[in-house]
Structures are given as C-alpha cells and as structure tokens.
Image (tube, rainbow, N blue to C red):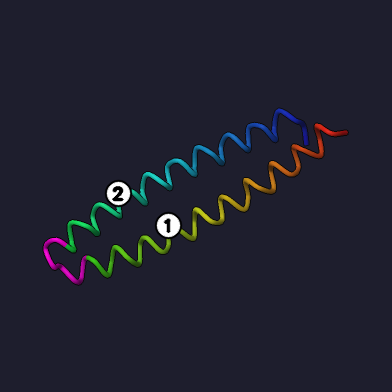
Amino acid sequence: MSLDKQLQQLEDNLVKQQAAHEQLLALSKRKLDAMRKANHQDMIKCLQLENEQVQAISKLETQRLELVAQLTLMIEH
C-alpha cells in the first residue's frame, strides 16, 4: 500500500474519531439533562448509547494505532 493511501486512511480515521467524540459529548449532555429531570429511562438509554460509542471509539483508536505502526515501518524503510 502506498504512503499516500496510508496517510489518507489515517486522516479518515481521525475524522471518524472526531465525529464519534462529538456524538459522545452530545450523549453526555443528554444524560446530564436526563439526570437533572430525574428521567431514569432516558438516562439508562443514554448510558447504553454512551457505552456503544465508547466501544466504537476504542475500535477506531486500535485501527489508528495499527495505521501509525504501518506508517512508521514504511517511513523507516
């Protein structure tokens, strides 16, 4: 795989991570609002969605680390 393609994949990954973190922030705000209103059902739903979002972010981060490792090997050789 070419260096340009690897760099593009890294950029795409970072854009996805940014969007995922923004979604997590929105969920956190929604959860805080549910807590203030003592809306237990919405709070539970937010917690579930937050968990899913954190798992997605973790997966993206693992992919990013793999891309960086591959890029490092390409640059060193």
Q: Is residue 40 magenta?
A: yes
| Up/down of 33 relative to 48, above or below | above
- How far, Cα to Cα, is label 1 from label 2? 11 Å
**Residue drawn at 81 percent across, 35 percent down:** 74
Task: Using the image as rendered, state which of residue 39 and residue 16 is in the foreground.
Answer: 39
Q: Quadrant of residue 13?
A: top right
Question: Is label 2 in a helix, a strand or a loop?
Answer: helix
| Up/down of 59 relative to 19, above or below | below
Which x, y percent locates residue 7?
66, 32
**Does residue 76 appear to the left or right of 42 in the view shown?**
right
What residue did someone put label 2 on? 26
Q: Amino acid at mark 2?
A: Ala
Q: Quadrant of the N terminus?
A: top right
**Does residue 39 appear to the left or right of 57 in the view shown?**
left
Categorize mark 1 by other alpha carbons within 10 Å: few (<14), some (14-19), many (20+): some
Q: Which residues are magenta?
A: 36-42
Q: Do labels 1 and 2 touch, CB within 8 Å?
A: no
**Residue drawn at 80 percent across, 32 percent down:** 75
What residue did someone put label 1 on? 53
Q: Is residue 44 magenta?
A: no
Categorize mark 2 by other alpha carbons within 10 Å: few (<14), some (14-19), many (20+): some
Which x, y percent locates residue 67?
69, 43
